[in-house]
Image (tube, rainbow, N blue to C red):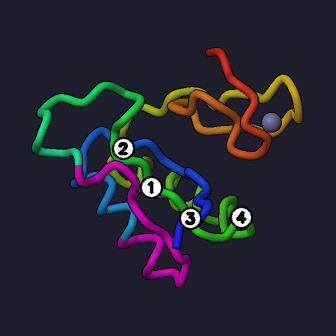
């Protein structure tokens, strides 16, 4: 079964992806990592195929984005500024290339 998944975070590596995955699943949010299998085969990955944490239900996406914020705050990472979608006006995390909601391309 091919599920349509909703991306919430593009991790820098599989460890980071799994940290977020555990955080989401601890809250009962169904989630999965895309591209995780590529890690280790290729070493440093281009951004477009980095492990991407996705939720399986669109309605969980905003709760999942909050978890991303919590994770980033917890580790004190410098946060990229949020990007505002030129199409729907919603904000996406700064490391996104397209709007999480309507998939319009975002430019920093
Ligand atoms: Zn949008």
Give residue 3's position: percent from left, percent from top: 57, 66
Q: How far apart are marks 1 and 2 (CA)?
A: 7 Å
Q: Do the residues labelled 3 and 2 touch (CB within 8 Å)?
A: no
State the residue position of label 1. Answer: 53
Q: Are marks 1 and 2 in contact (CB under 8 Å)?
A: yes
Q: How far apart are marks 4 and 2 (CA)?
A: 19 Å
Q: Do the residues labelled 3 and 4 touch (CB within 8 Å)?
A: yes
Kind of element beneath mark 1: strand
Q: Determine if the C-beta at disc 4 is less than 8 A from ligand 1.
A: no
Give residue 30's position: percent from left, percent from top: 53, 77
Per the rendered image, the range of residues in magenta is 22-37
Q: Residues within 10 Å of mark 1 (few under 14, many from 20)?
A: many
Q: Nearer the viewer, residue 47 or 84?
A: 47
Q: Distance between the residues labelled 3 and 2?
A: 14 Å
Q: Which mark is residue 55?
A: 3
Q: Which of 79 and 23 is in front in this view?
A: 23
Image quadrant holding the C terminus, namely top right
Q: How far apart are marks 1 and 4 (CA)?
A: 13 Å
């Amino acid at each position: 079964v091919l599920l349509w998944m909703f991306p919430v975070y593009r991790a820098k590596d599989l460890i980071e992806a799994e940290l977020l995955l555990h955080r989401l699943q601890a809250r009962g949010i169904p989630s999965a990592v895309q591209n995780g299998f590529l890690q280790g085969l290729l070493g440093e990955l281009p951004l477009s195929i980095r492990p991407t944490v996705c939720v399986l239900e669109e309605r969980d996406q905003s709760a999942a984005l909050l978890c991303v914020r919590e994770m980033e705050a917890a580790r004190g990472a410098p946060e990229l500024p949020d990007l505002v979608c030129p199409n729907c006006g919603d904000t996406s995390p700064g490391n996104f290339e397209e709007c999480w909601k309507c998939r319009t391309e975002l430019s920093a």
